[in-house]
Image: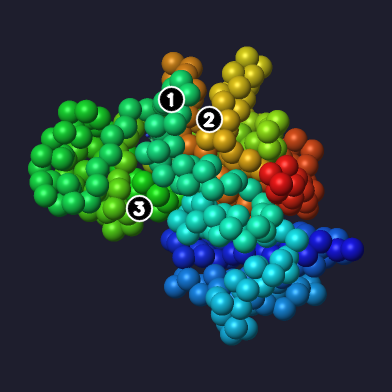
Amino acid sequence: MKTKLGLLYGGKSAEHNVSLQTAKAVTAAINLNTFDVYPIYISIDGTWTEGAKLEAPAASVEALQLSGNGGTEHVLSMLAQNKYDVVFPLLHGPNGEDGTVQGLLEVLNVPYVGNGVLASSAGMDKIMMKNVFAQAGLEQVGYTHLIRPRWEQDKERACSRIEEEIGWPCFVKPANLGSSVGISKCQNREELAAAMDEAFQFDRKVIIEEGVTAREIEVGILGNDLPECSVIGEIVPKKDFYDYKAKYEDGDTALIIPADLTEEQKVNMKELAIRAYQSLDCSGLVRADFFLTEDGRFLINEVNTMPGFTPFSMFPLLWKEAGVDYPQLIEKMIELGIERHQEKQ
Ligand code: ADP
Ligand code: MG
Ligand code: MG
């Protein structure tokens, strides 16, 4: 018996296109002799569409942008009737990586790949995530946050407070996004004001962090209650920081795998990564991202509960180096999702 897999991709977020690219790669890598794969596309405006069972890898990203086939109600009833043995939410950002879709699947009792509701939602909100990390005793950069009405009320006052509490340079980010969308680095008040206006275009909450000069070191984690770390890698952005363009368009950011670290540093970082994983009650997978400061401290930056997942993304490359290739990684993640569902029963 083949496993019936619902491959959920696209999504109502700024990372829609990233998800499409990933879905194409997954259809090319997944073993169609083991899995019956049903593509389920979520358009940018949030309409769900189910495609016919895949007979071959998706020919193009356009081919994956399905239309017709009954729409959202049809797909929801297919999910409720347990048509799929497991669903793979290949979704990044809000309305997908943030626990909402995970909650829907929980309610419908459908097994799914990756993190559950709590880890997904806490991991999506950079403020909540940092609060949890602080509670777990993990070292990180200084941060503060602001909600939109407070910003609109008195921008001068907000800038003064940020200048005093955080200083320069600072990073301004929408609280709930990924892929560097809406993120700016600011050196002065003028840049800060523009960056805040920009970030509030994407979210009603914005986080402001101390900017650090540091190496960017990342590790993949796989597992449920007994997670394991991959090889450790390093990102060397050619630009000032690892922005959206550097991640997905220029492709000239160097990924160094394995990262040049001492044995002691590796052991230390893996221990911190597992602590971060467990503090958010993660399951399935995450990529844990750290800053390694010039004075040798590992500061946790974030965990990504559905990290970039094309075959050229950091997470799959780290596992490849650890001996798990892309098709095996996909299978492993699916197994972990099914296992987690069974353990809950
Ligand atoms: P995303 O979830 O969008 O990936 P990140 O918090 O990882 O957001 O920020 C994107 C990139 O911006 C990081 O990879 C790093 O290059 C840079 N960056 C973010 N925060 C800081 C910071 N506090 N200090 C220095 N660089 C930062
Ligand atoms: Mg992120
Ligand atoms: Mg990041």
Label 1 CA crowd tier, 10 Å (few <14, some 14–19, many 20+): few
Label 2 beta carbon within 8 A of ligand 2:
no
Q: Name above or below for residue 78 compared with residue 260.
A: below
Give how far apart the Cα atoms at labels 3 and 1 are: 27 Å
Spatial CA distance of label 2 from label 3 is: 27 Å
Residue 40 left/right relative to 146: right
Mark 3 residue CB less than 8 A from any atom of ligand 1: no
Which circle, 3 or 1, is nearer the viewer? 1
Tag on residue 135? 1
Asked which secondary structure carries label 1, the reply is helix
**Residue matched to label 3:** 182
Q: Amino acid at mark 1?
A: Gln
Discs 2, 3 touching: Cβ within 8 Å: no
The mark found on residue 279 in the picture is 2
Looking at numbered disc 2 in the image, what kind of residue is underneath it? Ser
Closer to the N terminus: mark 2 or mark 1?
1
| Type of amino acid at the residue the image marks with label 3 | Gly
Of residues 200 and 79, the one drawn nearer to the viewer in this rendering: 79
Q: CA distance from mark 2 to mark 1?
A: 8 Å
| Residue at 44% across, 31% down | 132
* Residue 43 image offset from top left, x and y in percent: 51, 72
**Residue depicted at 58% across the width and 47% down the height:** 116
Q: Quadrant of residue 201?
A: bottom left
